[in-house]
Structure formats: C-alpha cells, structure tokens
Amino acid sequence: MIQWRWLYPIICSLFFALLPADLTSQQVEDGQEVYLSFRYEGVVNQYITAIYKDDGTFLLPHLELFNALRLHAEADLTTHSISGRFPDRGQFRINYRDRTASLGNDEIEFDADQMFMSEMDFFIHPDILYELFGLEFSINFNQLSLRLDSEQTMPVLAIAEREQQRARAQQTEINLIQEYYPLQFGRERHVLQGGFLDYNLTANLMNETNSYLFQSSFGGEVLGGDVQGTLLGSWSSRSQSFRTNGFRWRYGIRNHSWITRVTVGQTTSRGLLPVSFSGIQISNNPLEPRQFFDHYRFQGRTDPESEVELYRNNSLIDYQQADELGQYRFEFPLTYGTSRYNIRIYTPDGEQTEDRARIQIPFTFTPPGEVNYALDAGRLDNPLPGTVDRSLLTRGRVSTGLTNWLTVRGSADYFESYHQSLPTFTTALTTRLFQHYLVEAELANDVLYRTSANVIYPSGVNLGASYDHYLREGGIYNRSGNQSAIQGNLFVPIQIGEVPLFFRTAFTREYRSISTQTRYNLNLSSRIGRVNFRFSFRDAQSERLNWATTPAARLNSVVTYTFSRSRATARLFRGLFLRGQITFLPHQSQIFDAELQVSRRVLGNGRFQLAGGRNIFGDYSFFRFNLSFDFNRIRTNTSARNSRTNYSLSQGIRGSVGMDPVNQNVKLNNRQQVGSAALAVRLFVDKNNSGSYDDGDELLPNNAIRIERASGAIFYENGISYLNLLQPYRQYNLSVNKSAFHNPLLVPVTERFSIVTDPNQYKIIDIPLYTSGVIEGKVLRLVDGTRLPLSGARLFLRNIDVESDFSDFEQELRTFSDGSFYSYEIPPGTYEIQIDPQQLELLNMEAETVEFTVESLAEGDYLENLDITLTPPRKDTAET
C-alpha cells in the first residue's frame, strides 16, 4: 500500500515553488513580502524574507542578512537603529529613524522609501548596503533568488574555511588520539566459532628432482579465546617432511591493567636471547599495539597576532594565533617512532618563517606510570647451541616508565641445560636527553654490558653508535665469541641545487682473543627526475684497517628508471620499470656480474618481471622470469630460472578461506587472514520494527559503510559489506554514508558507532534503517484574544538527546504566509523547536519551547499540530 502522506513534503515543495509570487507573499503597506533563495559561496543556503515594492525595487532584511553572513549587528529598539562592527572597516551604525548611516569616518543619508521597519526586522535598499559596505546584492525576480558579490570575504566563509581546516586538523588529531564513537558492538565470545584457513601450495620442477610444498594455517575461536597454528609439509622422491608451527590458544582481555592475555601452546619468548617454546605465557602488555606515548609541548615567541601552524609529517594538526605578547604554545600527543614537526609562522606583515624538529620515541619506551610484565614457562622447541636436549625455560620480564624521558626494564632468564645456579638477570635503562638524543644502557650479569646512543637532527642527519663488552667468550649469549664490539652508522641528506644526495655509512668492529675484524659499507644515492642512482661499497678487513681492498670488497651500482603513465608515452612503455646493475671487484679490478631487469603491470591485476645477465667472474649467463596475478579470490605466481646447466620452474597458488556466518558459506580471499579479524555489515530496512534482521527485511542494495583508521579490504556482495584484514581485539569507528542510500528519507538507527573485533572470524554487524520523520505545525500570535498566523518567523530545530547519534542535528525553518511550517528527513530522536529569540524581542512577545520525539518506524513517523503560540510578556516579566 502506498504511504501517500510521505509524499506530502515533496508535494508541498512543488506546490509552493509553482505558485505565483503574489500568492507566496504577504501584503505589507506599500509592498509585499516575498521569499528569496539566498546562496553565498556554498556556505549559505537559506530563504530570506524581502519586501517587493510597487515601484519594482526590493528592500532586504538587515538583521537576517547580517546574521546569515555572520556579520556582527545589534538592534536598538529605543532608537530604531542597528550598530555593530564591519570586518577591517570599523564600527558602523544605521539609524532608521533619522535615516543616516555611518561606517568609520564615512557617513551617508538615505530616503524614507529606501527603508522599512517591521515587527520582525529592519529592511533597507540594496544600494545603501553597497554604498556603505561594498556589498552588492542582486535579485533575480524570475527565479526569486538573491546573490551577493563582494571583494571582501564575508565572515561566514572565513569561518567555514577555518572549520574545514580545523576538521582536517581534528581528523589528524584523531589519528593521534583516537576518540571513539559510542560502543555498539563489543567483544563477543564463543565456545566454538569457525574462522579462517590460509593456504600456500607450490610445485617446483627442476632438472634433478621435483618437489611439492604446502603450508596451511588455520584460525578460529575456542572457549572464548583465539586459536591458530600452521602445518608445513614437503614431498619429493628423496624425502618427505611434516611439521607444525605456532599452534597456540590465546585468551585476550581488553583494557585490563593486571592481565591482558594468557597464551598456551607454541609461542616466542622475547628477551636477551629470543627463543621459541611450547608452554604458557602471561602478560599485561596491551592487545592493541601502542601508538601514543605521552604529551609534548612546543612553545615560543614571535610577532603579536601572528598565525602559527603546527605540522606533523607534513599534516596540519593544530594552529593558533599568538597572543598580544607574541607567545604561542602547542600541546600534542607523541607517537612511537620518528616524527617530523614543522612550525610555520605567518606574521601580520606577511613574513613567513619555519622551525623544524624531529622527535624519536623508541618502541622500548613505556608510558610514564605504567608497568608491563610477561611471564614465560615451558620447553624450548629447539635445543640450545651446544646442547642436544630441548631445555626447560623460565623467564620473566618487566618494564616501567619512571618519567616521560626514562624507562627501566628488567628480566630474569633460566634455561635448564645452561644455568647451573642463578638465572641471568638483565637491567636496562632507556632515556631521551635534550629532546634529540636517545641513550640506552644494558647490563646482564656474567654475560655483557652494552651502551648505545642515537640522534636525528631536524635536518635529517642521523647518527648512531653502540658498544658491547662481553664478560665471557662463547655461550648462548655470545655465539660469535667476541670480547667486545663497536658499531656505528651515519646518514646525511645533501641538497645540491635541485639534485638531492643521500649518504649513508655503517661499520662494525669485533674484537676476539685471536683476531679483530671490521666490516663497513658506504652508500650514495640520488634521484634526478625519474632516474634513481645508487652506488654502494662494502668490504671486510682483519686486524688493522688500511686503504687497500680485500677479496671480499664489492662495488655495486644500480640505476632505475620508470616510464610515465601519461598518454604522451607509448602504450607499450607506460609504467615500465627498468633496472640495471653492475657489480665490480676492486681487489681483482674485474667486473663480477651485470644484470638488466624489466618489469611492468599486465592485464590490470598482473605483473611480469624479466631479468637476464652475465656472471663474468664465473663465466656463465643466468635468466629469470616471473609472472604473478592478484585476483580477487586467489593469487598465483609462476617463475622460471636458468643458470648454467640448472633450471627450475615453479608454480604457486595461495589465498584464504573464511566462514561467512551470515549466509553459512565460505568466502575466498587473496590475502592471508589467519591472525586478523573481519566484519560482515548488513544495512537493512527494518519493516517489522523489531530492531533485528528478519525474513522480509530489505537489504540496502549498495555499500554505505565506512571505517576509520583501517587499511583492510572492503567489498560488497549480496547486500552485505565485508571488511577484511582488521586487527583482532581492536576498537574501530564505523559510520554510515547516508548519501549512498537510494531513498533519501532513510536514516540508520545509529550513524556513528564503534565496534570491537573478534579474532579469526567474521563479526556480524546489523544496522536497521527507518524512514525519517515529518513534522508540521503553525506559529500563531495572540492578539486581543485572537490567534493570528505569523509569517516569516524563524524557527530553530535541534536534537536535545545528547546520547543520540544525531545529537548535533540542527535545522532552521521558516513559516509561510499562513504561519505554517514543515520539515522532513528528521532522524529518530528527541527534539525541541523554538522561535528565534531576536525576533521575539523585536515583537515584544514570548513563546514556550515545543518538545517532541520522532520514533524509529519503518514507514516513518509523522507529527502534526506542533503549534507555537506567541503571547504578550507576563506583567512580572515586563516589569523586570
């Protein structure tokens, strides 16, 4: 059955649009009220009430226009004047009684027929606004539209531009400190839930023997925890093997200070000697990788009233205006890793300056006041070096942030086959000095002590060094048998005109009881247009260093070029990648080998690579070919190699299978999914108003879901949006894109919300949709006991439910000549509607605020008779 009443808003809009102007206006003295559509720079779009005079001229509402343009204006009813401040021009005052107007030192007069005072506003001729303010208003009578041309930017546009900048800055800020929407779908635990199966099948055909390899990983949920593992196998005519890796069950607990995970099975123990073991691990390290460390402050001084912008990695994150003393101060969160910060200052006289800084927060830092620990116990998966048995392991680690510049770590290791008495205790300090310098000191009893330092300057220069001193030669903690070791590295970016140069060097010097060895390398790279150059030299010397090269020395040069994808480039060469490489042996004064590689995309989702070269030192040629395709549900890779008399041909297939709980079937994916999470989102019209998806409900036939801070894949199929490759146990913000709806009257029950992903499975997210509400009513004015309609009244409609997803919903309405108003596309929620207080003051009337609730209904909610009556002020109010 057709719901005719929902066509009412559209019919009304067409009705009023088609009526002649004289029927959509109200007679006033020697003119009539007309409604003009006023638009300005895409930021103002509203109807204003103007007066059309018998002589064909228009008078424009002064207060209403200035309010729309965000120009400061105040009305004085006692003197019948409007005053305020016009941007960059000073104070203004327009006296409608004396018919004079002034702006700064300029003053003009106007005639009585160029103004009109009503109960609702002060009306003035456009010529006065142009002569006084330079605001050129033009009216198109045929289209009933109003246009503004002005060389000066109106405050409403400047405010909109700043709000856009602020929105972008806030979006960047969200990337720093996540502000989550209300949690609608939390972590759901299951006794048994199917999940993902990854596979990788490879066949190798060689001239000697053929081999077949497979690797399969599975992941799911058992007893509320995620379980996963990997099976690896190989078969050939000579041997067969089968083994497992990473079989473990983990119970994750979010947002708990004492314990966040319990892992049972095969896992890795981190520490001075990382090892794989089978056993149990308990920890309170956060399930979500830390991104934010602490807050930081930038402050300084510049010219007063300067604009100061703060950029992080070339993204604006904050901005402010320096105070009257020229001082500014930014406080922002620090993220782990290395970040580049720029402060750009725009002084009032147009000068621009910029300061740069780089701040490092190593991942070994623990936020101030937090304590993290991990306890491991079990049996090693492989024997320690020098032993034959799989030793028992017990290890404990703890880390705490004493301040925002000092983190302390400690650990105790005990291996049954190595430690005879006490375990190995380790203590480490990590600190940041003078903003740029990172220093770390580590001591392990009877093993070693180690110090390191690193600095990155604002110019990009990176310098690092470390020193290790071993307390015993050999053993599981010193497999190289060193007595000590020194390491260093240096990176320097250089700009020569338009050509960038990057110099990098690193060295390691190891001291042993019988020898000393030094390894070093030098790298120089540059980029000119689409050509990239890289030259590197490496060598290793024993005992004393000298300028002579050794047989281990290698000088390598690489040149790459990528053809443009523009139409000016021949189709065959578009996007073609070329790479040439030559390796030279300085000690022998001979070229070792040379190679040329060609690569490009083919057939949209494929890539081929062809490489060939000559090993001059070994006197043989080699050839490589690779062709890969990345299909939607599977990935394939074909490669062929030939070198001397050896050849090989390899064919690989890999992908992933996921159990879709919505349709009870499987979903194929071309990426590995075990260890991740996924969503299956259904947007549907809830026809029976049950709040859940039932038979007969209508699925939305397009993808309208968005997710923040996620790089996973999104695809739409059979009315369901699938989001893959998300992090497990993590909270994400989701939003509904209403512009994608085929029916503009549909609104979701929740527009912005957050969820917590479930590991190794698809999580079902159901979002009901309902038809938006329609409201209508009248504004009446009580005069001598009679209710008369009030046209041209401004009404402010806003959502008053702070917990609603539409809490920021606001709308401005206008009444027609009969005092009626209406609006549609009102989302479900609780609202209030009230008369513009400024108009009430001009009318010397008062009115109560009307509250109402729009229900969530499939056919939409229709509210009528929302009448507002204006009454004279009460005596006590008038006396006050």
Image: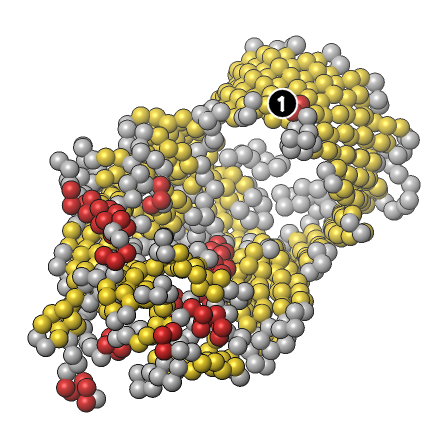
Q: Nearer the viewer, residue 297 or 449?
A: 297
At which x and y percent is residue 754? 34, 50
Q: Is 191 left, or right, of 56 in this rendering?
A: left
At a point 35% along the width and 41% down the height, the residue shown is 740
At which x and y percent is residue 41? 46, 57
At which x and y percent is residue 788? 14, 69
At a point 48% along the width and 75% down the height, the residue shown is 132
Say which element carries label 1. Answer: strand
At which x and y percent is residue 323? 55, 78
Whether residue 630 is situated above or below residue 283 in the rendered picture: above
At a point 66% along the width and 19% down the height, the residue shown is 625
Outermost left residue: 785
Q: Say whether residue 810 is visible.
A: no
Whether residue 636 is situated above or below residue 150 in the rendered picture: above
Q: Is 825 left, or right, of 125 in this rendering?
A: left
Q: Nearer the viewer, residue 877 or 680?
A: 877
Mark 1 = which residue? 608
Whether residue 144 is situated above or below residue 224 in the rendered picture: below
Q: Nearer the viewer, residue 42 or 759?
A: 42
Q: Is 789 left, or right, of 592 in this rendering?
A: left
Q: Say whether residue 841 is visible.
A: yes
